[in-house]
Amino acid sequence: ISDLRNGGVLVYDPADFTPEAGDFIAYAVPFNELARKEVQLFQTKNMVMLGAISGLFGPPIEAIAHVVESKLSKSRKSNP
């Protein structure tokens, strides 16, 4: 949080911690709980996080999917 700019945005899981008040906008999203309940896989927490960020800030989910696919493709090539 010390690296967060004044007026910045923090998206966090309230199960992990609760930030002290500061000069930022905070969104509490229960990523762990959503990953377990909705998808039944804790490992999908990062995907739940990406979906929440897309919903909050508006980048189209297709754009996020493209970035994820591109990263996974590079990872698979370097780790066959």
Image (spheres, rainbow, N blue to C red):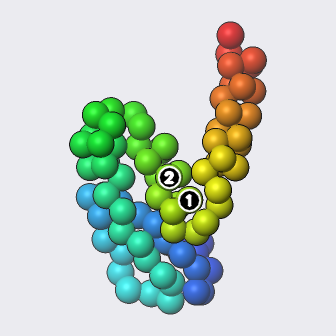
Q: Nearer the viewer, residue 65 or 25?
A: 65
User: Considering depth in this image, is 74 or 38 the residue closer to the camera?
Assistant: 38
Q: Residues within 10 Å of mark 2 (few under 14, many from 20)?
A: some
Position of residue 16 in the picture relative to residue 48 (left or right)? left
Residue 53 visible to the viewer: yes
- Point 47% across, 44% down: residue: 46
Viewer-proximal residue, 1 or 30? 30
**Residue drawn 50% across and 89% down?**
23
Please tell me whether residue 68 is drawn above or below residue 18 in the rendered image: above
Q: Is residue 59 left or right of residue 49?
A: right
Cα separation, mark 2 vs mark 1, equals 5 Å
Residue 79 occupies which quadrant of the picture? top right
Query: What is the three-letter code of the residue carrying label 1?
Result: Ser
Badge 1: few (under 14), some or many (20 or more) residues near its Cα, within 10 Å? some
Disc sitting over residue 54 in the figure:
1
The x, y position of residue 24, in whole percent, is 51, 84
Q: Is residue 17 visible?
A: no
Which residue is label 2 attached to? 51
Q: Residue at x 72, y 25 (%)?
A: 73
Q: Which mark is residue 66?
A: none
Give, as a three-letter code, the residue at label 2: Gly
Vertical position of residue 54 compared to residue 10: above or below: above
Of the 4 image quadrants, the one containing the C terminus is top right
Disc 2 is placed on an element classified as helix
Q: Residue at x 49, y 43 (%)?
A: 47
Task: Give the image location of residue 33, x and y in percent.
Answer: 26, 49
* Tags 2 and 1 touching, CB below 8 Å: yes
